[in-house]
Image (cartoon, coloured by chain):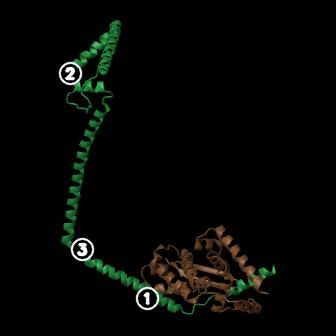
Amino acid sequence: MFFTLLLIKRLNNGIQSSILIDLKLIEECRGGNLNNFRKLIELTSPFAYSVAFRMLGDDDQAKDVVQEAMVTVWKKLNRIKTAEVYKTWIYRIVVNKCYDQMRKRKRNPEFVADGKTWEIISNKFSEGPSAALENGETTKIIALLTERLSAKQKVVFVLSDLEGMSNDEITEIAGISKSAVKANLYHARKNISEKIEKYLK
Amino acid sequence: MKPEKRKYDKIVEMLRTSKPTLNSAEEIEREVIRRIENTSSMKSGLTEMLGFLFGWVYIGWVRRSLITASIVLVMIFVYQQGMILKRIDVISRQTIVSSRESEISPSNEIERILMNYRNPLRKFPSKNTTISEKQMQELLEYVKELQLKYKDLEDLIEGDPELKSMIERKLRDINNTKSNL
């Protein structure tokens, strides 16, 4: 029997991102088929990278996280019983790897957002909602907006406001209660809004 | 809508629509596959080593001999356990006897001497072997008290013929049991 399940189907203001992963593909990977696993990497890595990049703000670190996450997926693929679980599971792995990276970074801080970032934001802001950002600009803006947030607040903000996930999904992925998700999101939004109001005229 | 909320929404929207682009997806794929293959080659090396060390157990006659030896060992073990349990049972009974003996240890010096007199095989540690005048008086008082109690009992039995006949019957039974033994 061939199961085909639509894993992610999210409409974000006209932008539809959908990833099709069927259970058969997962089962074949489980059997040790590396060619099929290549396909799984191809399907999974873009959205895993998106979360990692938005959280870490560093291309190399985000790639490392995706690589490590995919190796973990290969090792523990036996745990996946349905294709629906796969999505939450891969996000959880990525988020945990990002936590590790953030902890390491806390010990050796290397990234500091400079004041010019507000200029970029201001310019893009005047361009309107259609303004597209490059990876570097996204890094700077997220780093600047979230520099005073705790790791949990940052994770909740990225997953909720940038990746467009529901509170239930975040609860499962981040391993925190629903009320904690709401509280962290409230603080994150408040902090970012205050910052925007202060610097963006 | 508040202006700060509008600004927030606009910036978040800008960030949301600008999805980070992964330029080197093939590089990630290559690296992941390389790491997986490295891990599996390490695993196969370990399997080879285990096969070299313990592969001989798959030889037919070795396997049969090992099965026979294991059955014999299990049987020896069961027999040994049975023997041990039997021995423990014997020892535990001995313990109960000695504990009963300790229950009837003498409470005072006179009782100890009397018990020694009754059973010369039983030895209790004693500090002095002589009996003082006071102890002798106590002994005499005990004897006198005992005689009085005996007399009372005799009167009681004489006064009740039914009780007397029952006691006689009991004594006869006890004597019969002793003679049978």
Q: Which mark is residue B103?
A: none
In the rendered structure, find residue B58 and report the number of the disc placed on it.
3
- For label 3, the SS is helix
| Tags 3 and 2 both on a single chain | yes
| Residue B71 image position (x, y, % from top left) | 22, 60
**Residue corresponding to mark 1:** B34
Residue A130, quarter of the rendered image: bottom right
Please report whichever mark, 3 or 2, sits nearer to the chain's N-terminal start: 3
Q: Secondary structure at mark 1?
A: helix
Specify the subunit that label 2 lies on. Answer: B
Residue located at (21% from left, 19% from top): B176
The CA distance from mark 1 to mark 2 is 96 Å
Residue B76 vs residue A188, the one in the foreground? A188
For the residues labelled 1 and 3, say whether their Cβ atoms are less than 8 Å apart: no
Q: Chain of mark 3?
A: B
Identity, as a three-letter code, of the amino acid under mark 3: Tyr
Chain letter, colour brown in render: A
Query: Is the residue A58 above or below the residue B75 in the image?
Result: below
Residue under label 2, please give it: B178
